[in-house]
């Protein structure tokens, strides 16, 4: 599940970096997801890098870094040392929806962190 979230977030970041005036510009920033056992914070940077932080119930924090690209609504996220993960994204206000290409039934909904 973590790899899916990380990949989708990276994909979303790449979309915002590559697209001018589209959803890409709206992607830059931090997005959060709370799935009960852990909280995930994904930060897409304008330089095409992404930081994914997992905070577990016990307070332990894990971090992963990588890069992302965005072509239209297609986000590709590649964690450092990992394989590229692809997803379709959409942004509606402060809500980011990620639909992984390889598991379209596992839609993730993240909220912009301010």
Image: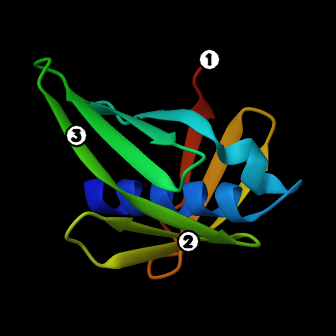
SS state under label 1: loop
Mark 2 = which residue? Answer: 87
Instruction: Identify which residue is drawn at 74% across, 55% down.
Output: 24
Where does the image place residue 45, in percent across and percent down from the top left? 54, 43
The CA span between labels 1 and 3 is 20 Å
The image quarter in which residue 79 lies: bottom left
Picture layout, residue 82 above or below residue 25: below
Instruction: Identify which residue is drawn at 14% across, 17% down.
Output: 59
In the picture, the quarter occupied by the C terminus is: top right
Q: Are marks 2 and 1 in contact (CB under 8 Å)?
A: no
Mark 3 = which residue? Answer: 63
The image quarter in which residue 30 lies: top right
Answer with left or right where residue 10 lies relative to residue 25. left
SS state under label 2: strand
Mark positioned earlier in the residue sequence (2 or 3)? 3
Answer with left or right where residue 3 lies relative to residue 9. left
Q: Nearer the viewer, residue 60 or 82?
A: 82
The CA span between labels 2 and 3 is 21 Å
Answer with left or right where residue 3 lies relative to residue 47. left
Q: Nearer the viewer, residue 55 or 109?
A: 55
Where does the image place residue 16, in percent across and percent down from the top left? 69, 55
């Amino acid at each position: 599940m973590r790899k899916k979230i990380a990949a989708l977030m990276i994909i979303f970041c790449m979309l915002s970096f590559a697209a001018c005036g589209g959803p890409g510009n709206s992607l830059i920033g931090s997005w959060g997801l709370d799935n009960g056992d852990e909280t995930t914070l994904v930060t897409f940077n304008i330089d095409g890098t992404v930081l994914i932080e997992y905070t577990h119930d016990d307070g332990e924090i894990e971090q992963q870094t990588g890069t992302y690209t965005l072509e239209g609504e297609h986000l590709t996220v590649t964690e450092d040392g990992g394989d590229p993960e692809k997803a379709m994204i959409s942004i509606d206000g402060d809500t980011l929806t990620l639909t992984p290409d390889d598991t379209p039934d596992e839609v993730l909904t993240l909220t912009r962190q301010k």
